[in-house]
């Protein structure tokens, strides 16, 4: 059998040179992102075997199958057993009449991007296709420099891309808006699988067992929350005779998904997306003006409320320094010492849904603030860019055929769930045994049964999502709950989250597409402001910085370039709105 994979690894010291070896492998990884597998062992292996090969060349010089070859550069994922024999690979080769040859880039995305940059700048022959999660600016720059070619004519031609053009209007419009660069060209295809649950990560959970013990109700306002926290902190609701209860806690934004409680509380004063998109910027009530929520009187009011909680010993100040490991350890203590916490998912409790501590908690709706505001920290689900055709591709039509193939519904399902009939099924004989993820909330029965989970483990069924893909919101809502047992708590909690959080937001600012010049002009400004806002929030809430210093805070934001950031964002939004 012809061996096609060519492994490319960077030196640990210098990002130069090309070392290649046959096959794939690695360890680690898991979750929704590739693991950052170390390259030292693989590099040593490549050096010891002495295998080298150029792009488009079989590593062992085996005989050609007679099919046209498409060379694909892709970061090597530790959860993909073998790209050559992968089920998705064989499916593409058979149905598109093509032979795929893989150029395996380093697992770590920054190393993979460095290798791509080196290939593009050195003038060496590029692979036909690059399957790598790039930013919109990176895609634009490679496109403007002629490394990636435009796909506009193909995507707007239903005969050239029948599967892309057959998708529903909502999905197609979302993808087209995202993949259209600021210069009007389309240089990439996208993975777009919007999931309701991921759009509102800052969910707040309250200890219902403690509420019942103290005869209290779930709070609905910020003032009621304060009263409940006072009771949690002073009336020994865990019954161990020790004043060890923590009324409300969380974890730092960079350490745990959806676990920074101040973002949940702040949405009782002003809408804030949790710095999940557009550097935290939002739209004003007029739906036209871009604003910075973190520079408003409402933001200051939210800080004042949280600083009061902290001053009275109700808000755990360690949430501003606690990492994910410490956070889980806190949630797992016996007896339970946590009364209220913001958590994106129950995985932060050891054993998740089966955790005795987690069983005590239930979701709490967004709280009404003093002005009646009750939002959830929501952001749009954005397509990820994954498929780019390079200037050296000799058969662009074939590359487009393969790119479009990913958008066929069963193929998109394969890219996420594995082999049809083995790992997933839409047959009634299987779906009738399952409970739909949103059956309770929306009355949608199970239409997609997961038979064998091919995620978060080493498998040979797909490329771990590193390719174009489209699954609609309905596809996601109609999948099974993945929870065995009579209670189906996974489905119940997701349905509850949908009811409480999904629509509790104003008009959202779409993810802005900047030109290269705009992005370069605000890159440092946006980073500095984001860091400053987060650190200042912690300082104001913990009392390390008095709220009397608010005007100086605003002045510093302006000095950092806030007005330039707002003006640039407004120009980008106006440009997108006019298209």
Image (spheres, helix red, strand yellow):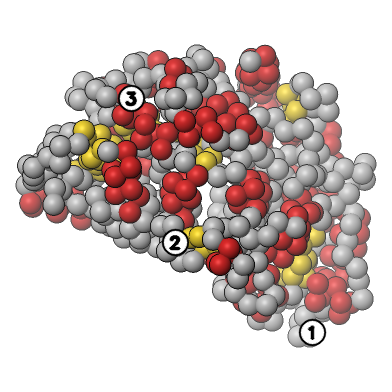
Residue 463 visible to the viewer: yes
Mark 2, secondary structure of its residue: loop
From what the image shows, is residue 248 above or below residue 396? below
Residue 560 placement (x, y as % from top left): 62, 24
Q: Determine which residue is flagged by label 2.
A: 421
Please give left or right for residue 122 compared with residue 139 in the image: left
Q: Nearer the viewer, residue 571 or 40?
A: 571
> Looking at the rendering, which quadrant does residue 25 occupy?
bottom left
As measured in the structure, the alpha-carbon distance from the residue carrying label 1 to the one carrying label 3 is: 69 Å
Label 1 Cα crowd, 10 Å radius (few <14 / some 14-19 / many 20+): few
The label number, if any, that marks residue 239 in the structure image:
1
Residue 237 placement (x, y as % from top left): 82, 78
As measured in the structure, the alpha-carbon distance from the residue carrying label 2 to the one carrying label 1 is: 51 Å
Residue 17 visible to the viewer: no
Residue 399 placement (x, y as % from top left): 33, 30
First of labels 1, 3 by sequence position: 1
> Looking at the rendering, which quadrant does residue 229 occupy?
bottom right
From what the image shows, is residue 539 above or below residue 419? above
Q: Determine which residue is flagged by label 3.
A: 397
First of labels 2, 1 by sequence position: 1
């Amino acid at each position: 059998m012809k061996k096609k994979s060519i492994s490319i690894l960077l030196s640990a010291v210098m990002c130069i040179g090309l070392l290649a070896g046959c096959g794939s492998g690695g360890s680690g990884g898991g979750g929704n992102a590739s693991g950052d597998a170390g390259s030292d062992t693989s590099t040593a292996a490549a050096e010891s075997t002495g295998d080298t090969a150029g792009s488009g060349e079989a590593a062992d010089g085996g005989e050609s199958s007679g099919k046209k070859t498409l060379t694909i550069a892709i970061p090597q994922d530790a959860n993909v057993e073998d790209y050559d024999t992968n089920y998705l690979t064989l499916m593409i080769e058979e149905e598109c009449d093509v032979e795929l040859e893989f150029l395996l880039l380093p697992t770590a995305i920054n190393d993979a991007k460095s290798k791509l940059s080196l290939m593009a700048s050195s003038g060496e022959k590029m692979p036909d296709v690059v399957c790598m999660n790039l930013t919109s600016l990176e895609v634009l720059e490679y496109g403007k420099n002629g490394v990636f070619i435009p796909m506009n004519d193909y995507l707007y031609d239903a005969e050239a891309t029948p599967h892309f053009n057959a998708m529903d209007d909502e999905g197609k419009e979302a993808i087209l808006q995202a993949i259209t660069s600021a210069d009007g060209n389309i240089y990439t295809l996208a993975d777009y699988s919007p999931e309701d649950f991921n759009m509102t990560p800052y969910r707040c959970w309250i200890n219902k067992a403690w509420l019942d013990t103290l005869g209290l109700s779930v709070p609905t306002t910020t003032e009621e929350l304060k009263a409940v926290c006072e009771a949690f902190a002073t009336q020994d609701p865990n019954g161990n005779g020790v004043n060890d209860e923590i009324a409300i806690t969380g974890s730092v934004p960079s350490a745990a998904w959806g676990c920074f409680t101040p973002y949940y509380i702040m949405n009782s004063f002003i809408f804030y997306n949790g710095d999940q998109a557009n550097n935290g910027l939002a739209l004003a009530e007029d739906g036209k003006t871009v604003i910075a929520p973190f520079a408003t009187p409402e933001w200051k009011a939210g800080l004042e409320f949280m600083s009061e909680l902290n001053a009275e010993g109700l808000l755990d100040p360690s949430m501003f320094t606690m990492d994910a490991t410490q956070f889980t350890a806190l949630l797992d203590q016996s007896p339970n010492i946590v009364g209220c916490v913001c958590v994106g998912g129950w995985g932060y409790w050891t054993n998740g849904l089966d955790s005795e501590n987690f069983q005590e908690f239930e979701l709490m709706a967004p709280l009404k603030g003093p002005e009646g505001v009750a939002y959830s920290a929501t952001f749009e689900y954005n397509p990820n860019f994954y498929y780019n055709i390079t200037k050296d591709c000799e058969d662009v039509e074939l590359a487009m055929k393969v790119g479009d193939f990913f958008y066929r519904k069963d193929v998109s399902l394969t890219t996420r769930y594995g082999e049809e009939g083995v790992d997933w099924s839409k047959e009634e004989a299987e779906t009738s045994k399952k409970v739909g993820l949103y059956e309770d909330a929306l009355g949608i029965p199970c239409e997609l049964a997961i038979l064998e989970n091919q995620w978060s483990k080493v498998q040979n069924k797909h490329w771990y999502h590193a390719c174009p893909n489209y699954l609609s919101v309905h596809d996601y809502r109609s999948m099974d709950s993945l929870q065995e047992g009579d209670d189906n708590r996974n489905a119940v909690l997701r349905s509850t989250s949908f009811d409480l959080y999904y629509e509790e937001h104003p008009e959202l600012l779409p993810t802005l597409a900047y030109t290269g010049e705009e992005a370069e002009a605000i890159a440092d400004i946006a980073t500095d402001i984001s860091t400053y806002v987060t650190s200042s929030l912690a300082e104001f809430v913990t009392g390390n910085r008095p709220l009397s210093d608010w005007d100086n805070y605003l002045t510093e934001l302006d000095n950092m370039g806030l007005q330039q950031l707002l003006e640039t964002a407004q120009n980008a939004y106006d440009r997108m709105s006019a298209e």
